[in-house]
Amino acid sequence: MKKPEQLLELRRREMVAKLKRYGIANRLVLDAFLEVPRHLFFDAAALEFAYKDAAYPIGWGQTISQPYTAAFMTTLLVERCSSGKVLEIGTGSGYQAAILDVLGYSVFTVERVVELYERAGALFSTLGRHIDCRFGDGSLGWIDEAPFDGMMITAGAPKEPESLMNQLASDGCMVLPIGDSSSQHMTVISRSGKDFRKEVFQQFSFVPLVGKEGWHDTVF
Ligand code: SAM
């Protein structure tokens, strides 16, 4: 009979095999999803959901993103900017930040729900991951740490926040879902000096980016 840890590892391998079947092909990304134990970002009572390809509630009306969605965003980032400083907006459970850390980025992450910020920060310490996290409105970026080579906004924005655009390095790129409250198109904004190029991909459904340069919280 397999030990619980071995079973969880088996489930993780199955999750990554599914990501491959769904078209995630980047070896670095697949390896990172194999390396990070997603179940550590779940409550003990919810372990059976950790390796399903689905979003899952993490409290305060928020979710940990579906593995496919996280892998799709990570691939867009890795293929355009493979190293350097990355800013994630929407720490949530901390899973995506851990994936970025494993990929070798220097990771900064901002969360607007104080309880999630505290929980993720404690988890990063327990796991020995050096990830800088901050509580606040990430739609305004992290000016003291700018510029960033990459950005990943893991909440749905009505449009690209200008503060974030200004904090991108001159050859940096930002991955974010843009749309309305029910669905958004995954979008990449790549900067080249003063010019910004936009690429638009398939639709996803995210919780909203709530903030000064996102949605106003009275809307939700
Ligand atoms: N990346 C997360 C993970 O790996 O678990 C999932 C993110 S969840 C889909 C979106 C997160 O964005 C939520 O935790 C939400 O509180 C946060 N959020 C929404 N608006 C924000 C803002 N203006 N600044 C920072 N975080 C924000």
Image (cartoon, rainbow, N blue to C red):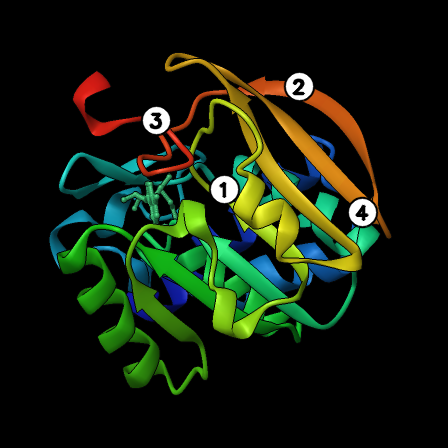
Which of the marked residues, 1 or 3, is nearer the chain's N terminus?
Answer: 1
Residue depicted at 29% across the width and 37% down the height: 56
Q: Position of residue 68 (x, y in %)?
A: 56, 36
Q: Is residue 169 above or below residue 64?
A: below
The tag on residue 215 is 3
Nearest the camera: 40 or 175? 175
Can you see residue 16? no
Mark 3 C-beta to ligand 1 under 8 Å: no
Q: Is residue 9 above or below residue 140?
A: below
Which of the marked residues, 4 or 3, is nearer the chain's N terminus?
Answer: 4
State the separation of the CA atoms marked 4 and 3. Answer: 24 Å
Nearest the camera: 14 or 215? 215
Can you see residue 156? yes
Which of the marked residues, 2 or 1, is nearer the chain's N terminus?
Answer: 1
Q: What residue is disc 4 on?
A: 191
State the separation of the CA atoms marked 3 and 2. Answer: 21 Å
Q: Amino acid at mark 1?
A: Pro
Q: Label 3: state its secondary structure.
A: loop
State the separation of the CA atoms marked 4 and 2. Answer: 21 Å
Q: What residue is disc 1 on?
A: 67
Q: Position of residue 61 (x, y in %)?
A: 17, 34
Asked if the residues shown at circle 4 and circle 1 are in contact, with their CB atoms under 8 angstroms apart, the answer is no
Dividing the image into four equal quarters, which quarter contains ligand 1?
top left
